[in-house]
Amino acid sequence: MDNSNTYEAPGVIYEQLARIGKVVVHPKRIELLDLLCQSERSMEALAAATGLKLTTASAHLQIMRQARLVDTRRDANRVYYKAAGEEVCRFIAALGDLAQARLAEVKQILSEIGSHTETTQRVSRAELLSRVRAGDVVVLDVRPTQEYQAGHIPGAISLPLEHLEARLDEFDPQVEIVAYCRGPLCLLAPQAVATLQKHGRQARCLEDGMPEWRQANLPVAVGSEVNVWQEFSPTAMTE
Amino acid sequence: MDNSNTYEAPGVIYEQLARIGKVVVHPKRIELLDLLCQSERSMEALAAATGLKLTTASAHLQIMRQARLVDTRRDANRVYYKAAGEEVCRFIAALGDLAQARLAEVKQILSEIGSHTETTQRVSRAELLSRVRAGDVVVLDVRPTQEYQAGHIPGAISLPLEHLEARLDEFDPQVEIVAYCRGPLCLLAPQAVATLQKHGRQARCLEDGMPEWRQANLPVAVGSEVNVWQEFSPTAMTE
DNA sequence: TGTGTTATCTATAGATCCATGGATAACTCA
DNA sequence: TGAGTTATCCATGGATCTATAGATAACACA
């Protein structure tokens, strides 16, 4: 209690925070972390998904592991990585929110690629819940199958975006479709909605994506589809 | 709609996120941003507070400005910096939460320096609100005066930690004291509580600090102290 | 208009980070 | 045990980041 630094938060703390900051300096590491917030993946799958060489991807993952942001699990010859807890996903979400709020470039990219007309009128989670209970809406998960199986909105149909066009005729033009994907920065759902609208279907995007749904403590289904809407009481709508 | 990358969120987005990530690689930049979430400050004050040379601090602030995380304002010869919006503070808070959750080192530092006994039993914001209305508690803001004036809990007394010991006799041993500071990673309030307890006062820390109070949409007073508790209805307790 | 104050810009040497290929390690399964 | 598969470790140029001093710019005020 007698050194001059007693009254200040020590710089040591900020050095620790910078260990985490170090992870999000590199675009590919953010991309990796974003993927890992959707589902666990093998080293090989991560390298392929991000277009990195195996050794490079491994190096990035090691940096994340030193910062304790990812956990690993071994199964046969494969090492599977996953985000180390909800806080990681919340942090990445906060980063995305911040970027969207502060960087005009992000807004522009989003509106250029995912045509921004339908992103302006998104369905809220609360609305989706009640509409699904009423049964007058189809929920569409357009992420890769693997991510759907790792956790999806109960009742949602899995239809990865690249297969949408081939199966358009399965959708009734009278029933509205609500599509969702990885989150506000992901363009899968906006693109799906654009395609659906172009072919005369009623379609909108869900606000945000799966991680936000999970963080709102709403029900999450795992594995292949089972329709379990009725199992959840209205009190589950803690949003 | 015919290039092979159509179905993937473009890497361009992650490059933009990395612009923000770049800010939080460097411990001093995190420290600067943390300070700016408490109150705006002049260039000179920021350099002094972080122990940086003026030119170095300026360089760091420029990097933050390029990432749009800070805004500036000029007054006479001084340039004042401030955090560019609530999202910035939320992001820094998420970083702190993540560090506290994942890095054992952070927990250890916190428990070593601010004796961790009183950090385990903190007062919730809701409890503080009702206790203050009941009038059986003293709220103590132990941050520097400048930060108090930029925004404090209505009814709180400003007493920067370094002056606490000199004014101990002003506190009635019968009335409990609740101290708060910058947030969960700030050690000012825990140290104040330790000092108060050592001298026979009943004292506890508030959970988190001023930024979290603000983000909970609770009332914030500005400038010199005016007791305005009664102005706020119970519905302001949206937490 | 000129002088003083404060902040930013420029240049630079030293440190750190990145991608990559090749070697090594961990582990499975026959 | 040994061959095969997958991930990590190591070494290395090339690029980027950091701190600082000195020069310049922006501005207030007389």
Image: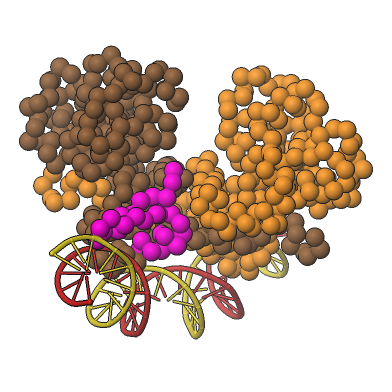
Chain colours: A orange, B brown, C red, D yellow
Q: Position of residue C13 (x, y in %)?
A: 31, 84
Please state the horizontal and vertical placement of residue B157, each as a whole percent of the image: 20, 30
User: The C terminus of chain A lies in which quarter of the figure?
Assistant: top right
Residue at left offset 8%, top offset 32%:
B167
Quadrant of the rendering where the N terminus of chain A is positioned = top left
B135 vs B70, nearest the viewer: B70
Please say if B228 is above or below A191.
above
Quarter of the image where one finds residue B80: bottom left
**Bounds of the magenta span?**
B60-86
Q: Is residue A195 left or right of residue B158?
A: right
List x then y, in percent, for residue C19. Answer: 58, 73
Indicate left or right for A203 with A150 as reference.
right
Q: Is residue B116 visible?
A: no
Residue D18 in the image, given as x and y percentages of width and height: 35, 68
Q: Quadrant of residue A19?
A: bottom left
Question: Which of the pair B198/B28 is nearer the observer?
Answer: B28
How many badges with numbers are in the image?
0
Which residue corresponds to the image point at 20% horizontal and 41% vertical from the top-left? B145
> Residue B81 lies in magenta, yes or no?
yes
Q: Is residue A100 magenta?
A: no
Name, please, the residue furthest toward the right: A169
Residues B27 and A36: in front is B27
* Residue beneath the point at 33% across and 39% down: B183
- Asked if one can make out residue B215 in the rendered structure from this viewpoint, the answer is yes
Residue for point 25% across, 37% down: B223
Name the residue nearer the viewer: C6 or B179: C6
Q: Is residue A94 above or below residue C7?
A: above
